[in-house]
Amino acid sequence: MEPNTDRPKRLFQIGLLLTFSFLLLRAMNVYGEPVKWDSHSSVIATLISFFSVTKYPPSLHYLLMTLGPAFMLLGWFEKCGGKIAERLIIIGRVSFFYYVIHLYLIHTIAITIGLWQGFSLRDMTVIFLENPANFGISLGGVYIVWGITVLAIYPACVWFAGIKARRRDWWLKYL
């Protein structure tokens, strides 16, 4: 079977269309998002209002705003090769496995950070909307935790991708 050379271009075009649709619908402020955006005295505050969309449950604007760039990136990544692409493909082959493992690791890291910041374990066992005051790390810290998480889970993804390649159990295709 011959690879589809039009696929990256089409993915990019679909992503561009979705992103443009988000910008158009959000600018009109009439459909697709329960919370309207409004102008503020500063450009930054106006941009924050414009891009502040409902994630839970996901609004049409949230879906357009996230899927559009994701499709464009997917089209761009399909043209890439090399070691980074190979590593991303491994994670993509076991995406649900990665998702489940990362939840446990992220929660463990969050509790560890909370303990390090002086909170008790009891303080850390709350609903996520009720985090203790002053709990958390900077955005730079979040990126560091993200990188550590991906690097820590990668060997488990390689291991599980190997299992999926060797075995044909029906349930493995769901992981």
Image: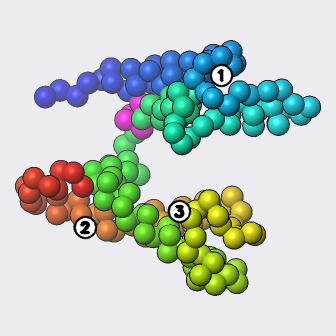
In the image, what residue occupies the spot 31% across and 68% down? 156
Camera-side residue of 34 and 6: 34
Label 2 packing within 10 angstroms: few (<14), some (14-19), many (20+): few
Q: Earlier in the sequence, mark 1 or mark 2?
A: 1
* Residue 76 seen in the figure: no
Residue 82 lies, in percent from the top left, at 37, 48
Region of the chain picked out in magenta, as a range: 75-79
Q: Determine the CA span between mark 1 and mark 2.
A: 44 Å
In the image, what residue occupies the spot 25% across and 67% down? 159
Q: With respect to residue 168, does 109 lie above or below?
A: below
The residue that label 2 is drawn on is 159
- In magenta segment, residue 159: no
The residue that label 1 is drawn on is 26
* Front tag of 1 and 2: 1
Residue 138 lies, in percent from the top left, at 71, 63
The residue that label 3 is drawn on is 147
Q: With respect to residue 30, does 40 lie above or below?
A: below
Label 1 packing within 10 angstroms: few (<14), some (14-19), many (20+): many
